[in-house]
Amino acid sequence: MKLIGFLIITAALVLGVSVAPTAYVPHLDLPDEQLVGLTLNAPAGNKQTEAPPEDPAAPGEPIATPNTKLTPELLTELRDADVKRVRVKEFSFTRWSGKWWFLLAVAGLLAGAALVRVDARKRLAASTDVATADAGTPEATLATIIETIEGLRRDLPNMTTEHDREAAIIERLGEVQAVHVPAFVDGRERLVSKHGMSGYATIMDRFAAMERQINRAWSAAADAVDEEAIDCIERAAALAEETRAAMRSS
């Protein structure tokens, strides 16, 4: 269904783009009252000359130049010169020969988007059913990350040696890096379905900032720089809460 939706959207875009230029290029077979007074936005027609041009490829002298107002006499001259359309500055839905095709393109866009949204809802429902069994939702994954960070904040002050603190940071954040961060990223489809692209972008902006602080804390602990590691954990904790708040608000 998603593929069909995107195919319809693509076809509708092609159709819409192809007929949109006709909005300012009315047919000259329209009644004079719909054309008189319009302002040309491009040269119209070519004057017939008795002598052949020196350069057959060179454009001839136009019957009417840009910014010329259409008059009944000018319309007659253009029609006699077999001019089918002219480009004008004014828009009118009634003069637009491609309006029905354009409306069909709009309907196609709406229909394609609806199919994509229906497919996204179905995928979200399916992922929710699976998540109920294994608690593997992005929300649950983030909760585990926050619990790990808070556990470090709670336990580190009670550890007596630097080695114990460094080992705890490396072990616990290492699991976050290897397991929980990828699991959260893998939940992209569910996040986009639930929060939309803008909401997803906000969530991932905060999440990525938190992940960087987790990585820095792990690296600092591996380099035996406890103070920097603890500072990074504090920043990661604040960013994790911002991520959770973004998920709740969008």
Image: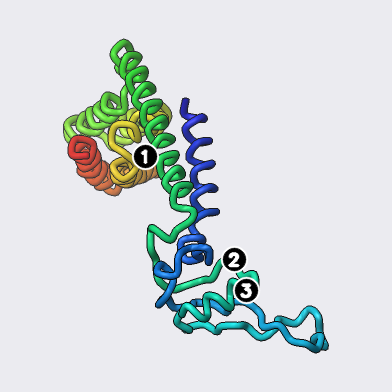
- Which of the two discs, 2 and 1, sits closer to the camera? 2
Q: Secondary structure at mark 1?
A: helix
Disc 3 to disc 2, C-alpha distance: 10 Å
Query: Label 3: which residue?
Result: 80
Query: Label 1: which residue?
Result: 218
x and y, in percent, of residue 161 in the image:
26, 34
Residue 76 as seen in the image, left or right of residue 121 = right
Which residue lies most toward the top here? 133
| Label of residue 84 in the image | 2
Label located before the other in sequence (2 or 1): 2
Is residue 221 something that shows in the picture?
A: no
x and y, in percent, of residue 168 in the image:
31, 30
Label located before the other in sequence (1 or 3): 3
Type of amino acid under label 1? Trp
Type of amino acid under label 3? Asp
x and y, in percent, of residue 16 in the image:
49, 50
The residue lying at 45 percent from left, 49 percent from top is 102
Above or below, comparing residue 91 to residue 49 in the picture? above
In the depicted view, which residue is nearer to us: 125 or 44? Answer: 44
